[in-house]
Image (cartoon, rainbow, N blue to C red):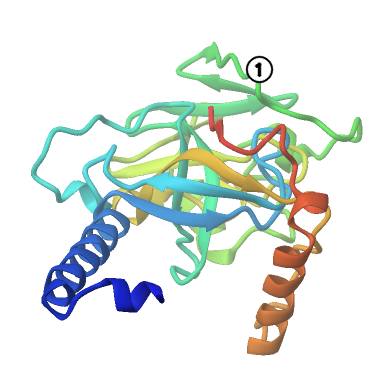
Amino acid sequence: MSWSEKISVGDWPATIQTVAGAVVIAVFVVTFFMQAFTIPSESMEQTLLVGDYVLVDKFCYGGSGGDIMLPYRKIRRQDIVVFHYPVNPAQHFVKRVVGVPGDRLRLINKRVYVNGAPLEEPYVQYITAARDPYRDDFPRTDVPAPEVTAKWWGEMRKLVEDHQLIVPEGYYFVLGDNRDDSTDSRYWGFVPRENIIGRPLLIYWSSGGLNNDLPGSPTVGDRLYHLAYAVTHVFEITRWERTFRRVR
């Protein structure tokens, strides 16, 4: 007797109701509380690696823009956040907050100072001894860098006092943990509060052997090949030591 034959006709409405209820709950959780993201670049190494798949807690800050009327905590320095990239909101970035509204920031020889005090950053990685005056001694209004957006170059110069960048109300300054190889607030500016989606909570899977570099606009075929390879080689490519690790 098949599984369907074991379920009587009278049981079908209850079964459908149970499945529908589970789907509604899953959609509710994904919409308001959790969202899955893939780490696409090396900018947060070694905290987050390319190929890490993370669950993002969308509830901790009260939802996008803080509009959910339930208790939530403020965004703090050293929080890792996922947000809509201000230059292109269709893209999602992940960085670490180093400056909150009202902070006065500067970098001296790669070291971050907030309100005159050095920020302890045990998570930061430096990959080169070569110095870049704009990147390492930020803010520099006398040394333009080719990666800096024109809009940010104009705005930044108005917000620098005594060699310190002042973070305005409603905005956050973010940096990548891979400090020498991160396109972050130094190059395109602040993250508006309403752009912040939430914080990565858990690495639910990590792929070390999968080619995670898809084209800028991958086709359906690219995605299907990517998925098929991952499914058929899951045991070989999984970084088990990172899977189910909390993000800190």
Label 1 SS: loop
What x and y, as percent, mark residue 208? 79, 49
Q: In this picture, is 13 found above or below 52?
A: below
Camera-side residue: 213 or 1?
1
What x and y, as percent, mark residue 157? 51, 47
What x and y, as percent, mark residue 125? 75, 29
Q: Is residue 33 left or right of residue 240?
A: left
Q: Is residue 246 left or right of residue 24?
A: right
Residue positioned 65% across, 40% down in the render: 48
- Name the residue that disc number 1 marks: 122
Q: Total of numbered circles in the picture?
A: 1
Residue positioned 50% across, 51% down in the render: 189
What x and y, as percent, mark residue 91? 51, 67
Q: Is residue 121 left or right of residue 69?
A: right
Residue positioned 46% across, 47% down in the render: 55
Residue type of the residue flagged with mark 1: Pro
Residue positioned 28% across, 49% down in the render: 33
